[in-house]
Amino acid sequence: MNAREILVTLKKLGKPQTAAVYKRHGSGDNVFGVLTSEIAKLQKMIKVDHVLAGALWKTGNAEARILALQVADPTKLTRADADGWIADGPVRFVGCYLSLLLARSPLNGATMRAWMKAPDESHREMGYGMFSVRLKENPDSISDADAENVLLTIEKEIHRSPNWARYAMNGALISIGIYKPALRKQALAAARRIGKVEVDHGETCCKTPDAVPYIEKAVQRKRCP
């Protein structure tokens, strides 16, 4: 299947009610309302196709961009690609897929750390999103010392960071508490000092997780060390 054929398929799978929900979550107007489960079926059929990913992204359609991020080859991703995708967005809608792809790419080192310090909302959100993905997929890929430094930065900067960067930083705090046992007590203590993290979720019912109970429940459920 080429990008045009996939776009036709996505349009047929779209549902107006789902499209309305996606728009409230920042998809923009170029959206069909395709369930993520249907997009996943296409991804399983395509597997990895970096050229197709680029063509899908260029369509501008929200679901096509989600699929693009799922079939792109992370080993071929360049800084220019990533900066372009972040600029194009909509980062709020595709952010979880983009951070997952970036975390598996060659950009998961110096670029991730630079973005975590970025003044703009989108790059900082992606930087902390990549950090969280790396901790979840391979906790040893980030040293305890580096994670501790990130924890200190989060406590210092979270309340004065941009809206969605705050959300990603809160997620990183939770990830440290869950996936870094040696830092769990520090993460919980920092979360208590930070207190409630205010994030504007727009016209949605989404809420920002409270780090302390989230960490405690996750540890209990997964029986983390």
Image: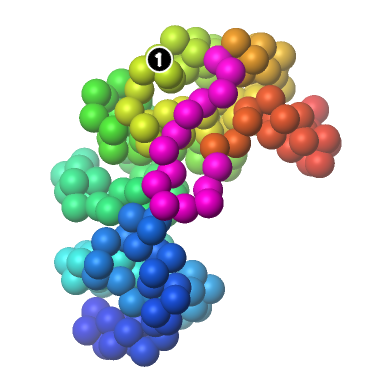
How crowded is the residue under tag 1: few (<14 C-alpha within 10 Å), some, or many (20+)?
A: few
Q: Residue at x 81, y 41 (%)?
A: 221
Picture layout, residue 69 above or below residue 96: below
- Tell me, yes or no, whether the highlighted magenta stretch contains residue 26: no
> Is 143 left or right of 215, judged from the image as shown?
left
User: Which residue is found at the position 55% from the left and 15% from the top?
Assistant: 194
Dot 1 lies on which element?
helix
47 to 99, vertically: above or below: below
Q: Please state the total of marks drawn on the protein image.
A: 1
Q: Residue 81, how many percent across, how many down?
A: 20, 49
Where on the picture, by quarter, is residue 9? bottom left
Q: What stretch is highlighted in magenta?
A: 194-207
Q: Mark 1 points at which residue?
A: 157
Between 164 and 3, the one lying in front of the other is: 164
Return the residue nearer the eye: 59 or 213: 213
Question: Which image quarter holds the C terminus?
Answer: top right
Q: Mainly helix, strand or loop, the magenta region? A: loop
Q: Is residue 21 visible?
A: yes
